[in-house]
Image (spheres, rainbow, N blue to C red):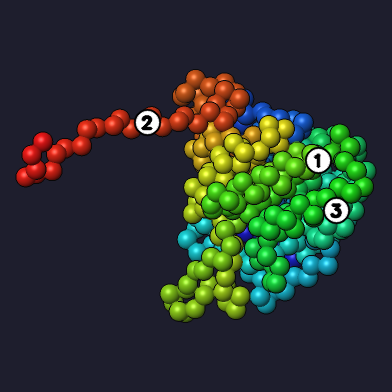
Amino acid sequence: PEGQSPYPGIPRMAASSDNAVNASAEGPSLRTVVCGLSLPSCVFNSSNPFATSLEDLQALDASAAGAVATRTACPGFVHDEATMKWASPDGANTINCLGYSPLPFEYYTGCLLQLSGAKPCWLSISGSAEEVGAMVREAAALAPSLPGGLAVEINLSCPNIAGKPPLAYDFDALRDYLGTVFAAGPPPPTLAVGVKTTPYFYDAQYTGAAAVLNGCPHLSFVTAINTVGNGLYVDVATEAPLLAPSCYGGLGGAAVHAIALGNVRRLRALLRPSIAVIGCGGVDSGEAAFRHLLCGASAVMVASALLHEGVGVFARVEAELRGIMASKGYSAVADFQGKLREPAAPQQRAAAPCAGLAP
């Protein structure tokens, strides 16, 4: 049964009856390689509130997920239980104004050393450029101790931090930020470093972001997308915002799936090939995962569905994805990854003459 999380404001994942790493049935392979890291499955969790504690991470490690991602650690962030909330108003989507983890970076580096080492780890971080640069260097020292490998995801995109718009929308500031992060030099080959982006909505945002990311030679991956900010759910019974008093929050789940797919496809087309794209947004089924991969994602991340089903969601999504692949004759992810079919050009038809006019 569901329990109370030991951390204020952080929900406990739904219980699951399936925690086995090898829960997958025989069939097409879901193995993938992302920025040099070998994942036994292309499906794993995103940085989210259900990856907060060591207990959460151990459950993810024991599950069928292909990797384990931590919640975002940010120096100096203070959780406010009165205003930072989370909800699932319809049992499918989620909305939250939680912000970052209440636990520090050092907590997560210690947690990773207590996992099995059987799969890669994704360490999510945020903060000032100087703070992030220091954490990247600490992660580089940690990486050789993790047999499955380590990636650091710099969260540029949280929409819930008061007075701080997501850095991923300010391209000049983002260029300077990344320059400072890597001022001490590139990360070692044993550490992959990437960023998590905001949802982009129009051409200038895609091209602006891609120009900055392509201009940073030390980035290995981009995760697209974070939640869609400034969502508002209204509780009909109380006639008030569901997240009151904060009101607005980041929306996730099936409602953002199409936006996520658009971001994955556009970024995959614009980024240099050495930058992997990880799809995140509405991955609640094998079909949703298949769409992300078809649009060019190297792997996919799960968040909202993880809450509703617990860690058993990975085995279910993977089984559904294998079923789709088998029905189409695909034996590996590479058989269809990034191979979205272009729609046929519409045939031009001669315009009919207007009634009453002589030809």
Q: Is residue 163 left or right of residue 24?
A: right
Q: Are marks 3 and 2 in contact (CB under 8 Å)?
A: no
* Viewer-side label of 1, 2: 2
- For the question of whether residue 159 can be seen, the reply is yes
- Tell me which label, 3 or 2, sits earlier in the chain: 3
Q: Which mark is residue 41?
A: none
Give the amino acid type for the residue marked by disc 3 in the picture. Answer: Thr
Give the amino acid type for the residue marked by disc 2 in the picture. Answer: Ala
The residue where tag 1 is placed is 218
Q: Residue at position x 37%, y 31% from top? A: 345
- Tell me which label, 1 or 3, sits earlier in the chain: 3
The residue where tag 3 is placed is 180
Q: Is residue 168 left or right of residue 356?
A: right
Q: Secondary structure at mark 2?
A: loop
On the image, the x and y values in percent for residue 83 come to: 66, 75
On the image, the x and y values in percent for residue 240 come to: 49, 78
Examine the rendered structure and indicate whether residue 156 appears above or below residue 347: below
Q: Residue at position x 87%, y 58% from top? A: 131
Alpha carbon distance from label 3 to label 2: 46 Å
On the image, the x and y values in percent for residue 248 come to: 57, 70
- Tell me which label, 1 or 2, sits earlier in the chain: 1
